[in-house]
Amino acid sequence: MTSPAPSIAAPTAPVAADKEAHKPSNFLRQIIEKDLAEGTYASRRWGGSPGDAAHHAAGQPDAAKVRMRFPPEPNGYLHVGHAKSICLNFGLARDYGGVCHLRFDDTNPEKEDTEYVDSIKDAVQWLGFDWHNHGETNLYQASDYFDFMYRAAEYLIEAGHAYVDEQSADEMRQNRGDFGHPGTDSPFRSRTPAENLARFREMRDGQLPDGAAVLRAKIDMASPNINLRDPAIYRIRRAHHHNTGDKWCIYPMYTYAHPIEDALEQITHSICTLEFEDQRPFYDWLLDRLAEQTTLPDGQVVGGLIATPHPRQYEFARLNLTYVLTSKRKLAQLVNENRVNGWDDPRMPTIVGLRRRGYTPESLQLFAERIGVTKSDSWIDYSTLEGCLRETLDGSAPRAMAVLDPVKLVLTNWDDVMGAGTLDDCSAPIHPHHPELGKRDFKIGKEVWIDRGDYEEIPPKGFFRLFPPHVNASKQAMAGSKVRLKYGHVIECTGAVKDADGKVIEVHATLIPDTKSGTPGADSVKVKGVITWVAVADAVPAEVRLYERLFREAQPEGGGVDFLTNLNADSLKVMTAYVEPSLASGGAIEAKADDKFQFERHGYFVADRVDHAAGKPVFNLAVGLKDSWGK
Ligand code: ATP
Ligand code: MG
């Protein structure tokens, strides 16, 4: 038995570095190349693990030329937008001799779940990337930095850069001003560092109720950038944290935590989506403050908390994909309300859903590369994603015949021509361009299954498949069509049997002798149509799940509507199909869970990772052969 191309089922390594040389440039590559050329980060040292300035100073010159990071919040399953970010960050690190950290951004208590942590690790590895690099394991969780974040907050207070504000949330909002109006200083803004420090420690020690006070950076209440109007950096929140338990009742705000996480990890290029562009000035302000040294009124020199040069943030446009939601929260809603069958439903744009649908790491890497990175938001057409899958499967997926909506075809002269009860041997290449993969064998007999749509009693114009003798619209008598059963014989359609409701239950045809594919004279009878089929004698029943887009509208929330109103009610059709026997146990292209195939004339299918079993095959439609959706 020949086995199919192994690359289709096995997890694959990322595209080899030598192929990367031809990648199109983009603004992020240009920034990195400039930094490398100028040696911006050449003097960096690495303490072997994340840490403060002293920790890294005691380390070695960093062998990693750049450090990137992918920092998901473990509050759901990753989606195709995250796949773009993973390919981008890990891909840039690989291409420029660096490393990429996987960091769980778990500074927000309550939301995290180990189920999500595990699924995120799986997703990154499945996509072909690894946080083990240069002998390091760069897998981190932001909550491990709480102690440093607290220390940095005390430092900011001592240096006069932060204060405890006890205004109510409403007062704070009002005093922030708006785009046209500067903010108003809080009455607490002029507290002394000593007062602030004492009060902040009371916050930490649980002496204030939730919401009674926040620690704010002291920057500029009149800044045209509202994010610089004394942003909150710590809040009181009595919540259990999955990592730190009940140690803390104050938690850092995301905008404060994130730059610090990057700095402790010695990240060089911190890439995020465009909505954080307005946060960049605060990112730099904070890291500048933590890096510099300050002389306190008592003459003491403090500061220099983080290594320099500190990380820089760069923004790129997030992925918006037509017919798709890219928000963990909204995807969670689909799951929780049972609108889909779980996070890995093949209609979901989650990485687990795409994988179950038949997407491969190569297809998603190709997609990420093809869409590139830009600085302005736009929508990518879903067909771009599908095209990448088609392209990566075409060269490797074994071919097979399948009849998705079966109706029986009876070759009425079979017994006379071939002999009663005879089955004839047929074969086909496993892959038309890879003869070395060998052949698949199957039988043909008196009865075969064909697709219902391949027969028309009165053929519409341009229909070249099965139709019986009939009188056409111009009142001409037409003969029954002659059609080739692919890899088999030419047949001539003679009619059909219908049930009481007029539904075709059997199509009849006669076999034209000496026309079998691959035999001398096979082409003596010219045909315009070729159809796929499987013999009743050896066909294997299979469940085939046909998927369509989950939403009817390209922009599921376009015009501000609730995406639920745009759910496509017909996004799943389950067919009781027949497939050729070579897909069964012991067959030349035996289907194992996750294996991909091209069902000839139908599209690419994958043996369902969850439900497929040797005795009970289940195939999912991954993508059609052509981009015909909506046409
Ligand atoms: P969600 O709203 O789905 O939770 P998020 O941005 O809050 O998305 P995170 O877990 O915080 O999700 O994101 C981890 C990383 O993935 C971030 O660096 C973020 O920029 C990136 N990312 C998330 N969504 C997209 C997207 N649609 N396109 C590109 N990158 C994305
Ligand atoms: Mg988020």
Image (cartoon, grey):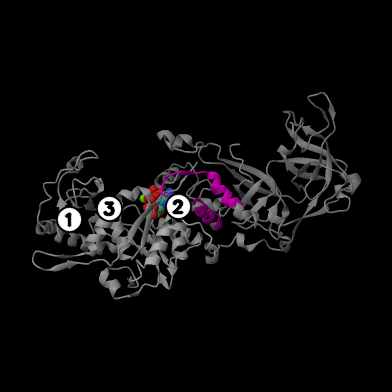
Residue of label 2: 373
Type of amino acid at the residue the image marks with label 2? Val
What residue is shown at x 22% (from left), y 55% (from top)? 250
Along the line of sight, which residue is nearer the eye, 283 or 109? 283
Dot 2 crowding, Cα within 10 Å, few <14, some 14–19, many 20+: many
Q: Does the magenta run of residues contain 563?
A: no
Residue of label 3: 281
Type of amino acid at the residue the image marks with label 3? Pro
Image quarter for residue 263? bottom left
Question: What secondary structure characterizes most of the magenta part?
Answer: helix
Residue of label 1: 162
Image quarter for residue 434? bottom right
Magenta stretch in the rendered image: 362-390
Residue 19 seen in this snapshot: yes
Q: Position of residue 128 (x, y in %)?
A: 51, 62
Image quarter hosting the C terminus = top right
Real-space CA distance between mark 3 and mark 1, rounded to the nearest whole angstrom: 16 Å
Residue 76 seen in this snapshot: no
Element marked by disc 3: helix
The correct choice, above or below, for 182 with respect to 250 in the image is: above
